[in-house]
Image (spheres, grey):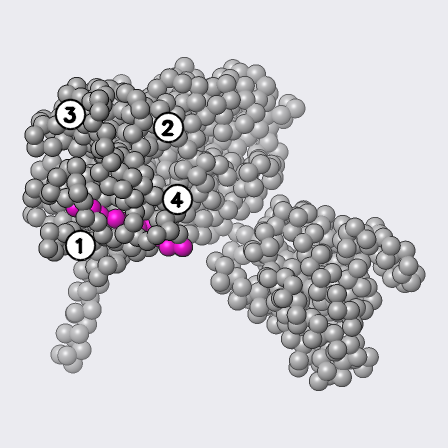
C-alpha cells in the first residue's frame, strides 16, 4: 500500500510540475521577427506588424513567457499613398519588416526597414515604456539587418540575403559611412546544403566573451527552415559556420540570457493562418558554441514559468469606456494602414467606438479605418454588438477576419433595406455566401477561429438578442498568404460604396480563447444508375430511428411526400425520386452521423437514373445520348428537366450555402460493362464537377462501388476489374467492394440487406478519409 501511495504522489507531483512550466510555443499568435534584450530582470522584445499602424510593437516580460505590449516605435511609418490606402494603393505584405532592438549608453534603439519607402529607420528613446521616440531615416533599405554597437563605440549594420554584408554607420546614425560596405560571409546558407531555396537572411549579431556570433535563417530545398550560426574573433570575419538547429522549421532569432546565467534562443515558426509564432529553445555552451535545443530538438516544455494566457497582454476585450486620462485605444489595437483620425472616435458617444465612412470604395481591402487585433491560438473567438441606426445607402459595416482570403460578417444597407451578410474571399474573389433580412437597429456578430493542428477554419455567427447565435455563410478555410505576410486578425470595419457620411457604433469587442462547437454540414453528391437510385423496397427498419442530422436535398418536387426541390428533409426513404427504393445512400448517411461529432450533420444530394450509361452525366455530350435513349429512360431524365448533371450541380450550389462538399459517391457501370474507357469517362465527369463547383480534387474524394459481385452471380461482374482501376485514373478515387452484398434474382441489383452493407462500406471509406484530413 505504501508503495502505491508513494507512486501516486510521484505522479501527482509530476502533473503539478508539468502544469506549472512553460509550453512551446510561448506565444500562439503572430509575433514574428523577434529581437530581444534584457535590462536587469526585465526583457524587452520588438517584432514586425508591417502595414499596421502604429507599428513596431515593443513588448515586455519578466520571465520570457508572459509578454505584454507596452509601446510602439511609431504612430505612422511615413505619409505615402500605399501606407494611407489612397488612390487604389496599399502596403499589404510590406510596410516595415524585421526590427532590431538594442541598448547602448543609456538609450534604447530599435531599427527597421521598409520595402514600401525604400528606407532604413532607427528609433531611439531613453524611456522604452513611455517614449518619446526620435526617428532617423536614410537610404538605402538594408534588408533584415542587425544593428550593432561595438565596444569601441562604432555602430554597424549587418544585413542582406545569401551574401551577408557589413556597413558602418555615421556617428549620428543617420546614414552609412562611405566605402565601408563589405561582404563578411559569402553564401551564408552553405552549411545547410548545396540547394538552398531561401538564401540565408534574418541576421542578428551578438558579442559574447569577446567573440561575435551571427544568427541567420536559411531554407534548403526539400528541407525545412534552418538556423545557421557563424562565429568569429572579428566583426569583419573570417567566420566559421554550422547548422545550429533544424527541427519543426523553428528558426530566425537570436540569443538571450537570464539574470542567473541561463541561456536561451528566441525563434519563431511559420504555423499556418495564425501566423508566425514565437518559441523559446534552451541553450548550452560547448567549446565556445551555443548549442540549441535538447538533443537537437525543440522541446515542447520549458523550465520557465507557465503562461498565464495571451489575454490581456497580446489581445484583449474592450468596452470602449474611456476616462478623461485614458488613451483612446489600448495598445492591443492597430489600424489596418494609416488611419484617417477624423473618421473615428471613442469620445463622441460614451462607451462606443464610432466609425464613420469617408472615401467611397468597392473593396474591403482598400477601406480605411479597419481596427484590428491579432487572432490567437489554438482557438479564439471575437464578438461585437453593432448599432447600425445611422448607416447610409451603400454602407457595409461589421466584423472581419483580415488576410488576403478574408471573411466578413456584417450589415449591408442596399436598396433601402438592411441585411446581415457573410462574405468569403477564400477563393480570392469575395463572394456573398448568405444574406439574412434585418429589421432592427442592433445586431450581434461573432467570428470563431480554430487553429488546432493547423486546422485553420473559421465560422461566422449573428445573433438578434445576444443569446442565441446563428451560424451564417460557409466555413472559411483560412490561409496564410505572402501577399499579406501576416496572421489573421480580427477587424472592426465600416465603409461606403456609394456616398460618405454614414456611421456605425460598436458597443464592445470581446475576445475569448473559447469557441462554439460550430454546427457544420458535410455535403456529399451521389449519382449513378439504378443501384444508386434504389431498386429494393425499403423495409420498416429503414424508416425509423433516422437521426435528423442526416439530411437529403430533394432534387425533384414530391408533393405527396411534402418535399420541394432544393429543400432539405430528414433522410426518410425514398432518397432519390418520389417512388424509388432503398439505396446505398441510406446507410451511408446513417453510419456517417453515428461516427461524426454531434455538431456535424450530413447532407446528401442524389441524382440517379436507372439503366443509364455514364455518358448521361457528360455535360457537353449528354444530349446526343438522351436523344437516342429509349422512352422509359427519357421519361426519367425529364424529371430532372432533361439534364441530370445540371440538376446535380444546381442543387450542389444551393447546398454549398449550408455546408462544405466533402465527397462524391458513384454507383454506375452495369450499362457500361466491358467499356475499357469507362474510367476516363468517369474522370471527365469528376473533373467537370470540380470546375463547376469550384472544388479541389485533393479535398473531394470520389468513392465508387462495385456492381454485383461474381460470388453473387452478378451478370455484370466482369465490370468490377475495370472499376478497380479507377484510382489509376483519378488520384483521389476509392473503390468499395461488393463481395458479400446479397443480390436479388435478376443478379443486377442488390437486396435491401445488400444496400445496407454497401452503404456502410461507403461510409467506412469516407470516415477514414475524414479522419486523415481533419
Task: Report how far apart the C-alphas of labels 4 and 2 lie in the structure.
Answer: 23 Å
Looking at the rendering, the stretch of residues picked out in magenta corresponds to 222-231
Counting other residues with Cα less than 10 Å from the Cα at mark 4, is it few (<14), some (14-19), or many (20 or more)?
Answer: many
**Nearer to us: label 4 or label 2:** 2
Which residue matches tag 4? 274
Up-down: is 511 above or below 416? below
Q: Are marks 3 and 4 in contact (CB under 8 Å)?
A: no
Point out residue 185 in the picture as x, y percentages from the top left corner. Answer: 24, 41
Which residue matches tag 1? 291
Which of pointers 4 and 2 lies earlier in the amino acid sequence?
Answer: 2
Task: Report how far apart the C-alphas of labels 3 and 4 lie in the structure.
Answer: 32 Å
Label 1: state its secondary structure: strand
Characterize the magenta stretch by its predominant secondary structure: strand
Which of pointers 1 and 2 lies earlier in the amino acid sequence?
Answer: 2
Task: Report how far apart the C-alphas of labels 3 and 2 lie in the structure.
Answer: 28 Å
Label 2: state its secondary structure: loop
Q: Are marks 3 and 2 in contact (CB under 8 Å)?
A: no
Which of pointers 3 and 4 lies earlier in the amino acid sequence?
Answer: 3
Task: Report how far apart the C-alphas of labels 4 and 1 lie in the structure.
Answer: 29 Å
Number of callouts:
4
Point out residue 764 in the picture as x, y percentages from the top left corner. Answer: 57, 70
Point out residue 556 in the picture as x, y percentages from the top left corner. Answer: 78, 53
**Nearer to us: label 3 or label 1:** 1
Along the horizontal axis of the image, is 50 left or right of 628?
left
Which residue matches tag 2? 115
Up-down: is 294 above or below 344? below
Along the horizontal axis of the image, is 574 left or right of 154?
right
- What is the quadrant of the N terminus in the image? bottom left
Counting other residues with Cα less than 10 Å from the Cα at mark 1, is it few (<14), some (14-19), or many (20 or more)?
Answer: many
The image's mark for residue 127 is 3
Amino acid at each position: 500500500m505504501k508503495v502505491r501511495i508513494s507512486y501516486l504522489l510521484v505522479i501527482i507531483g509530476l502533473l503539478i510540475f508539468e502544469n506549472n512550466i512553460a509550453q512551446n510555443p510561448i506565444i500562439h499568435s503572430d509575433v514574428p521577427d523577434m529581437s530581444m534584450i534584457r535590462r536587469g530582470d526585465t526583457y524587452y522584445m520588438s517584432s514586425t506588424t508591417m502595414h499596421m499602424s502604429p507599428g513596431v510593437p515593443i513588448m515586455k516580460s519578466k520571465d520570457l513567457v508572459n509578454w505584454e505590449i507596452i509601446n510602439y516605435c511609431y504612430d505612422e511609418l511615413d505619409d505615402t499613398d500605399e501606407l494611407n490606402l489612397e488612390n487604389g494603393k496599399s502596403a499589404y505584405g510590406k510596410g516595415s519588416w524585421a526590427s532590431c532592438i538594442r541598448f547602448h549608453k543609456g538609450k534604447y534603439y530599435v531599427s527597421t526597414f521598409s520595402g514600401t519607402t525604400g528606407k532604413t529607420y532607427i528609433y531611439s528613446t531613453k524611456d522604452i515604456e513611455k517614449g518619446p521616440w526620435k526617428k532617423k531615416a536614410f537610404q538605402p533599405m538594408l534588408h533584415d539587418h542587425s544593428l550593432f554597437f561595438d565596444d569601441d563605440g562604432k555602430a554597424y549594420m549587418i544585413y542582406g540575403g545569401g551574401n551577408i554584408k557589413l556597413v558602418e554607420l555615421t556617428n549620428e546614425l543617420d546614414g552609412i559611412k562611405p566605402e565601408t560596405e563589405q561582404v563578411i560571409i559569402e553564401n551564408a546558407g552553405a552549411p545547410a546544403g548545396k540547394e538552398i531555396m531561401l538564401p540565408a537572411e534574418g541576421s542578428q549579431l551578438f558579442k559574447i566573451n569577446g567573440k561575435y556570433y551571427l544568427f541567420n535563417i536559411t531554407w534548403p530545398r526539400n528541407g525545412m527552415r534552418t538556423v545557421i550560426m557563424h562565429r568569429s574573433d572579428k566583426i569583419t570575419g573570417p567566420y566559421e559556420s554550422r547548422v545550429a538547429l533544424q527541427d519543426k522549421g523553428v528558426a530566425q532569432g537570436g540569443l538571450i540570457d537570464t539574470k542567473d546565467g541561463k541561456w536561451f534562443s528566441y525563434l519563431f515558426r511559420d504555423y499556418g493562418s495564425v501566423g508566425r509564432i514565437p518559441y523559446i529553445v534552451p541553450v548550452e555552451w560547448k567549446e565556445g558554441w551555443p548549442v540549441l535545443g535538447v538533443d537537437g530538438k525543440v522541446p515542447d516544455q520549458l523550465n520557465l514559468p507557465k503562461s498565464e494566457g495571451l489575454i490581456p497582454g497580446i489581445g484583449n476585450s474592450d468596452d470602449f469606456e474611456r476616462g478623461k486620462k485614458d488613451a483612446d485605444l489600448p495598445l492591443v489595437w492597430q489600424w489596418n494602414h494609416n488611419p484617417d483620425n477624423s473618421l473615428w472616435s471613442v469620445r463622441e458617444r460614451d462607451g462606443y467606438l464610432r466609425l464613420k465612412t469617408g472615401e467611397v470604395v468597392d473593396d474591403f481591402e482598400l477601406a480605411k479605418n479597419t481596427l484590428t487585433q491579432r487572432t490567437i491560438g489554438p482557438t479564439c473567438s471575437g464578438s461585437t454588438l453593432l448599432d447600425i441606426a445611422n448607416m447610409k445607402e451603400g454602407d457595409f459595416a461589421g466584423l472581419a477576419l483580415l488576410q488576403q482570403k478574408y471573411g466578413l460578417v456584417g450589415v449591408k444597407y442596399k436598396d433601402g433595406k438592411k441585411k446581415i451578410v457573410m462574405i468569403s474571399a477564400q477563393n480570392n474573389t469575395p463572394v456573398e455566401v448568405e444574406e439574412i433580412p434585418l429589421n432592427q437597429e442592433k445586431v450581434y456578430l461573432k467570428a470563431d477561429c480554430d487553429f488546432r493542428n493547423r486546422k485553420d477554419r473559421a465560422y461566422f455567427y449573428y445573433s438578434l438578442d445576444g443569446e442565441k447565435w446563428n451560424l451564417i455563410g460557409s466555413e472559411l478555410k483560412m490561409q496564410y498568404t505572402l501577399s499579406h505576410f501576416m496572421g489573421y486578425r480580427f477587424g472592426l470595419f465600416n465603409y461606403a460604396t456609394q456616398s460618405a457620411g454614414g456611421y456605425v457604433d460598436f458597443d464592445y469587442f470581446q475576445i475569448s480563447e473559447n469557441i462554439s462547437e460550430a454546427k457544420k454540414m458535410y455535403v456529399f453528391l451521389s449519382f449513378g444508375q439504378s443501384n444508386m437510385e434504389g431498386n429494393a423496397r425499403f423495409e420498416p427498419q429503414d424508416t425509423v430511428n433516422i437521426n435528423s442530422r442526416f439530411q437529403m436535398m430533394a432534387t425533384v418536387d414530391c408533393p405527396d411526400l411534402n418535399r420541394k426541390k432544393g429543400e432539405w428533409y430528414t433522410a426518410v426513404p425514398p432518397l432519390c425520386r418520389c417512388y424509388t427504393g432503398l439505396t446505398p445512400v441510406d446507410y451511408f448517411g446513417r453510419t456517417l452521423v453515428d461516427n461524426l461529432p454531434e455538431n456535424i450533420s450530413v447532407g446528401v444530394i442524389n441524382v440517379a437514373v436507372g439503366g443509364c450509361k455514364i455518358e448521361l452525366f457528360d455535360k457537353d455530350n449528354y444530349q446526343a445520348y438522351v436523344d437516342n435513349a429509349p422512352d422509359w429512360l427519357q421519361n426519367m431524365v425529364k424529371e430532372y428537366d432533361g439534364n441530370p448533371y445540371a440538376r446535380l450541380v444546381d442543387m450542389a450550389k444551393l447546398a454549398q450555402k449550408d455546408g462544405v462538399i466533402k465527397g462524391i459517391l458513384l454507383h454506375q457501370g452495369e450499362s457500361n460493362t466491358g467499356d475499357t474507357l469507362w474510367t476516363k469517362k468517369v474522370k471527365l465527369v469528376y473533373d467537370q464537377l470540380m470546375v463547376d463547383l469550384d472544388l479541389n480534387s485533393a479535398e473531394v474524394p470520389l468513392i465508387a462501388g462495385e456492381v454485383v459481385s461474381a460470388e453473387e452471380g452478378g451478370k455484370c461482374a466482369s465490370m468490377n476489374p475495370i472499376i478497380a482501376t479507377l484510382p489509376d485514373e483519378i488520384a483521389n478515387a476509392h473503390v468499395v467492394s461488393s463481395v458479400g452484398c446479397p443480390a436479388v434474382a435478376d443478379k443486377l441489383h442488390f437486396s435491401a440487406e445488400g444496400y445496407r452493407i454497401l452503404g456502410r462500406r461507403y461510409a467506412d471509406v469516407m470516415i477514414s478519409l475524414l479522419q486523415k484530413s481533419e
